[in-house]
Amino acid sequence: MSLPLRMFAHARYGGRMQWHGVDVLHFDTEGRISGKFTYAMFRLSLWERVHA
């Protein structure tokens, strides 16, 4: 993520954020993770405040 985008996100949403998507994990024959792929259905991640 570019520095200007990170600065905007921090100013707009505070220190903690999240976005929505799905992670797909691929495993080898021994059960170890061999790949992790992240997918989202939008160009820019949907950021929202995380209520701690």
Image: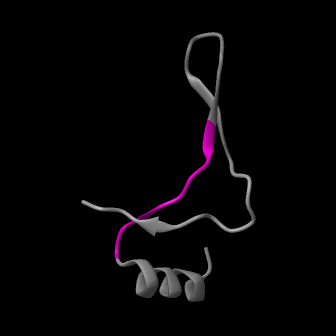
Quarter of the picture containing the C terminus is: bottom left
Question: Is the image coloured rainbow, by chain, by secondary structure, or in one colour?
Answer: one colour
51 up-or-down from 35: above or below: below
Expressed as whole percent of the image width and height from the top left, the position of residue 23 reads 61, 39
The residue furthest top is 29
Expressed as whole percent of the image width and height from the top left, the position of residue 26 reads 66, 26
Residue 23 in the figure: left or right of residue 14: right
Q: How many marks?
A: 0
Task: Tell me what residue is drawn at x 57 percent, y 52 percent.
Answer: 20
Task: Tell me what residue is drawn at x 56 percent, y 14 percent.
Answer: 31
* Magenta-drawn stretch contains 21: yes
Quarter of the picture containing the N terminus is: bottom right
Task: Tell me what residue is drawn at x 52 percent, y 67 percent.
Answer: 47
Q: Observer-nearest residue: 42 or 30?
A: 42
Q: Observer-nearest residue: 33 or 20?
A: 20
Task: Tell me what residue is drawn at x 59 percent, y 64 percent.
Answer: 46
39 up-or-down from 36: above or below: below
24 up-or-down from 30: above or below: below
Q: Observer-nearest residue: 49 or 22?
A: 49
* Magenta-drawn stretch contains 47: no
Expressed as whole percent of the image width and height from the top left, the position of residue 25 reads 62, 30
Residue extent of the magenta highlight: 15-23
Expressed as whole percent of the image width and height from the top left, the position of residue 43 reads 75, 65
Residue 20 in the figure: left or right of residue 13: right
Residue 11 in the figure: left or right of residue 26: left
